[in-house]
Amino acid sequence: MSFEDIVALQNKVGTKVYNQVAYGNNNSTGTTGRKRRLNKNRPTEISAKRPAPFLRQVVSVRKPTLRDPRFDDLSGEYKPEIFEKTYKFINDIKVREKEVRGLRELGPL
């Protein structure tokens, strides 16, 4: 039988019926619930009727632990005198900005 005749026969009777006749019945007693492949080098067929879960995590992701240093004991204790000494420069910057802003508001004379 030529290839064209085989394709014409397959189109006429249908692919499923043609495969059953050509390759034998798939309902052999040796398999228990598993489908046999027509060729061992082919991948197995898997049904696409069952949908994938909605929120499936493929790789588990570790959430970073967020911590606020203001309320965390690992950051040490709050000591106002050390804070004032360390951030004294901020008050100097505020005073300079007020002076510059005051000069701008006066404008050119």
Image (spheres, rainbow, N blue to C red):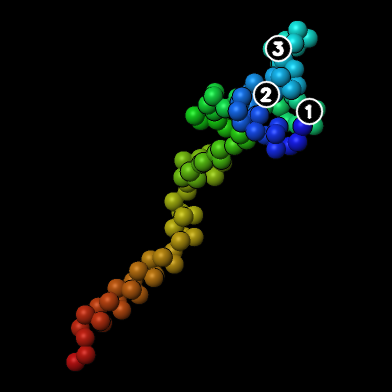
Residue at 75% in and 25% down:
38
Residue 88 position, x and y percent, is 44, 64
Residue 45 visible in the current orientation = yes
The amino acid marked with disc number 1 is: Asn
Residue at the spot 78% in from the left edge and 9% down from the top edge: 30
Residue located at (33% from left, 73% from top): 97
Amino acid carrying mark 2 in the image = Tyr
Mark 2 or mark 1, which is nearer the start of the sequence?
A: 2
Pointer 3: what residue? 27
CA gap, disc 3 and disc 2? 15 Å
Label 2: how many residues lie within 10 Å, few (<14), some (14-19) or many (20+)? some
- Residue 41, image x and y in percent? 80, 32
Q: Dot 3, crowdedness within 10 Å: few (<14), some or many (≥20)?
A: few
- Say whether residue 51 is left or right of residue 88: right
Does dot 1 land on a helix, a strand or a loop? loop
Q: Residue beneath label 2, please?
A: 18
Which image quadrant for residue 1? top right
Mark seen at residue 39: 1
